[in-house]
């Protein structure tokens, strides 16, 4: 055997011996091959559960959200913010309260959209390290102005797309004070739209708003006729005295957004949110 061949044989034997004790670039027999992957939280589905589950009369689950809710609740329990017994996939009032407590920890300044009990991207990122990763992230953007009214960038993009699908519209109310519309406009994602400029376009406008992800209704209130629209899945929607989040629930079950008990027996409106709509384009 040549010197070169003898050297190669020795090298192979040496590597085999090292591998047997876990020293040759791989684990020894019986050792784990890799660290277990962290669970994934779907931000879109988590937000949908947070806007629907607290209004449910039972502990029903939101489709596609169960695993994400369970993962987030486990993280809240680890922080001492949620009861050890609360382990299911229902994002109920107890979970909303626990999330508010987390928001109060991570935000240096409290405001209606940073302590609303809805998991924003910033708040989730603060909770996620070594616990979970995020998919389908929802970013509402910053405050901007549309028709002289304050809205967030996500809401503005939705509004402009609805305009493109129907006709030009004017926002008459965006973000407002706590005394405006019983608190429903104090956060983000909620707008009122003028109808008396083109009454014949009202139905088409409502349909377009719903198509892009708003829970929208025409309110035929004498002297104050308008379209009221709430961006589904918006992390900045305020939980005002009139319960904007409950209006998402009422939209789902056929209500007109007037009260938490306003629903239509057997109604089952499909829910579409902005990110979901964009994937159909």
Image: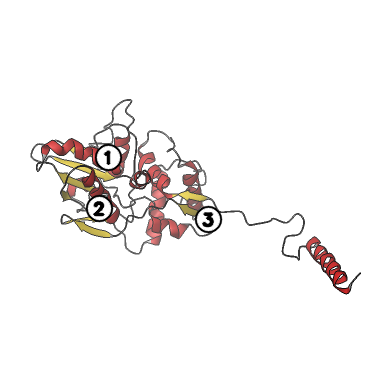
Kindly report the distance in space between the C-alpha atoms of the residues bearing marks 2 and 1. 14 Å
Residue 229: mark = none
Note whether residue 277 is visible: yes
Say which element carries label 2. Answer: helix
Depth check: 239 or 216 in front?
A: 216
The N terminus: image quadrant:
bottom right
Indicate the quadrant where residue 150 lies.
bottom left
Mark positioned earlier in the residue sequence (3 or 2): 3
Dot 3 corresponds to which residue? Answer: 131
Q: What percent of the width, then of the height, locates residue 269?
A: 32, 33
Kindly report the distance in space between the C-alpha atoms of the residues bearing marks 3 and 2. 33 Å
Dot 1 corresponds to which residue? Answer: 210
Kindly report the distance in space between the C-alpha atoms of the residues bearing marks 3 and 1. 35 Å
Q: What percent of the width, then of the height, locates residue 47?
A: 39, 47
Residue pictured at 36% horizontal, 40% vertical? 52
Dot 2 corresponds to which residue? Answer: 156
Question: Looking at the image, do the residues carrying marks 3 and 2 touch, with CB atoms under 8 Å apart?
Answer: no
Q: Residue furthest right?
A: 1
């Amino acid at each position: 055997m040549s010197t070169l061949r003898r050297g190669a044989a020795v090298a192979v034997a040496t590597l085999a011996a090292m591998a047997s004790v876990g020293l040759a670039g791989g684990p020894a027999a019986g050792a784990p091959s890799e660290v277990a992957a962290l669970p994934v939280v779907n931000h879109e589905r988590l937000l949908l559960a947070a806007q629907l589950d607290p209004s449910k009369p039972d502990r029903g689950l939101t489709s596609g959200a169960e695993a994400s809710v369970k993962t987030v609740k486990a993280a809240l329990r680890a922080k001492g913010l949620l009861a050890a017994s609360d382990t299911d996939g229902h994002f109920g009032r107890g979970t909303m309260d626990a999330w508010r407590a987390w928001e109060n920890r991570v935000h240096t300044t409290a405001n209606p959209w940073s302590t609303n009990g809805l998991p924003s991207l910033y708040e989730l990122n603060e909770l996620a390290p070594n616990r979970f990763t995020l998919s389908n992230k929802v970013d509402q953007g910053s405050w901007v102005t549309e028709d002289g009214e304050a809205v967030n960038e996500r809401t503005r993009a939705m509004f402009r797309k609805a305009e493109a699908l129907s006709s030009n519209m004017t926002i008459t109310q965006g973000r407002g004070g706590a005394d405006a519309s019983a608190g429903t406009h104090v956060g983000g994602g909620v707008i009122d739209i003028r109808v008396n400029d083109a009454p014949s376009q009202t139905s088409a406008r409502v349909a377009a708003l719903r198509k892009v992800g708003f829970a929208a209704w025409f309110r035929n209130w004498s002297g104050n006729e308008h379209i009221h629209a709430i961006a589904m899945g918006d992390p900045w929607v305020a939980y005002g005295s009139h319960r904007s989040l409950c209006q998402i629930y009422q939209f789902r079950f056929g209500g007109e957004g007037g009260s938490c008990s306003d629903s239509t027996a057997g109604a089952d409106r499909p829910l579409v949110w902005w990110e979901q709509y964009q994937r159909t384009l």
